[in-house]
Image (cartoon, grey):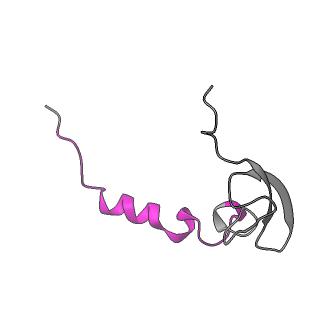
């Protein structure tokens, strides 16, 4: 294996949106760096089931209505 081609892999602290933290290993920043998240699984509607889900906004119904008459012609 070639030497000196791999990035520095070290411990960092990840700060979630609710202020909780955990330690992980990463190539981000310097050893002991802190990575503050803007979006995480505790706050984003995609994971929490909040009001922004696609089916609740009616986007699926809107798509189906828009393309209801679009059919492939049989040959």
Find residue 17 and report its image quarter: bottom right
Name which residue lies at 82% across and 62% down: 32
Camera-side residue of 14 and 55: 14
Left or right, 48 with respect to 18, comes to left
Name which residue lies at 31% across and 63% down: 66
Going by the picture, which residue comes out furthest to the left? Answer: 75
Find residue 2 and report its image quarter: top right
Quadrant in which the C terminus appears:
top left
Q: Determine whether 2 is above or below 51 in the image.
A: above
Name which residue lies at 59% across and 70% down: 52
Going by the picture, which residue comes out furthest to the top? Answer: 1
Q: Where's residue 55, x and y in %?
A: 54, 62
Going by the picture, which residue comes out furthest to the front? Answer: 3
Q: Where's residue 65, x and y in %?
A: 35, 62
Camera-side residue of 43 and 3: 3
Find out whether residue 69 is within the magenta segment. yes
Left or right, 3 with respect to 70, comes to right
* Residues rendered magenta in the picture: 47-73
Find residue 60 and report its image quarter: bottom left
Q: Where's residue 39, x and y in %?
A: 67, 69
Quadrant in which the N terminus appears:
top right
């Amino acid at each position: 294996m070639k030497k000196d081609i791999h990035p520095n892999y070290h411990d960092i602290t990840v700060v979630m949106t609710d202020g909780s933290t955990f330690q992980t290993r990463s190539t981000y920043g310097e050893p002991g760096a802190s990575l503050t998240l803007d979006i995480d699984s505790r706050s984003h509607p995609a994971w929490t089931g909040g009001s922004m889900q696609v089916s609740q906004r009616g986007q699926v119904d809107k798509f189906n209505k828009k393309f209801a008459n679009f059919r492939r012609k049989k040959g």
